[in-house]
Image (spheres, grey):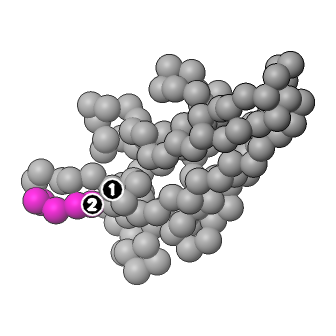
Amino acid sequence: FEVECKDEHPLISFEVANVGGRAGAAVPQLYVGFPSLRPAVRQLRGFQKVEIPKGEKAAVAFRLSKPDWSFFDEEEQKWTSAGDLGEKITVSIGTSSADLVWHHTLPEACTRDKDSAEVVA
């Protein structure tokens, strides 16, 4: 698994292997979670069906952007980026929400607007 940050657009890439005796397909799913998403723990932000010959691997990549870690703030009545609030944003990958095999917290540089001011209490 690899996470590459280019501005506020992280690229999540990995390989899926077919260890079976026949050609097949896999549908990896990508979920994003952050504290302001509550009561939900995470939300589905992408999936990709890949055909894989027996004994082979297939490359899969997901590009994320600010809407993927934004939520509607009821008090402010506007869309807000969890990254701009300094929240930890976790990316998870698996075959379903019940079978997540990889988790990674995105670096703050990937999720925070360069123009957003740092909050000091």
Which residue is located at x 41 percent, y 36 percent?
42
Question: Mark 1 and mark 2 in contact (Cβ < 8 Å)?
Answer: yes
Amino acid on which disc 2 is placed = Thr
Magenta segment boundaries in residue numbering: 76-80
Tell me the quadrant of the picture where the N terminus can be found.
top right
Measured from the top left, where is residue 64 in percent x and y? 51, 58
Residue 54: percent from left, percent from top = 85, 29
Q: Which mark is residue 70?
A: 1
Residue 74 falls left or right of residue 23: left
Badge 1 amino acid: Ser
114 drawn magenta: no
- How far is mark 2 from mark 1, CA to CA? 5 Å
Q: Which of 72 and 14 is in front in this view?
A: 14
Q: Which numbered disc flags the more N-terminal residue, 2 or 1?
A: 1
Residue 8 image offset from top left, x and y in percent: 51, 69
- In the picture provided, is 36 more to the left or to the right than 48? left
What's the residue at 60%, 36% (across, down)?
Answer: 28
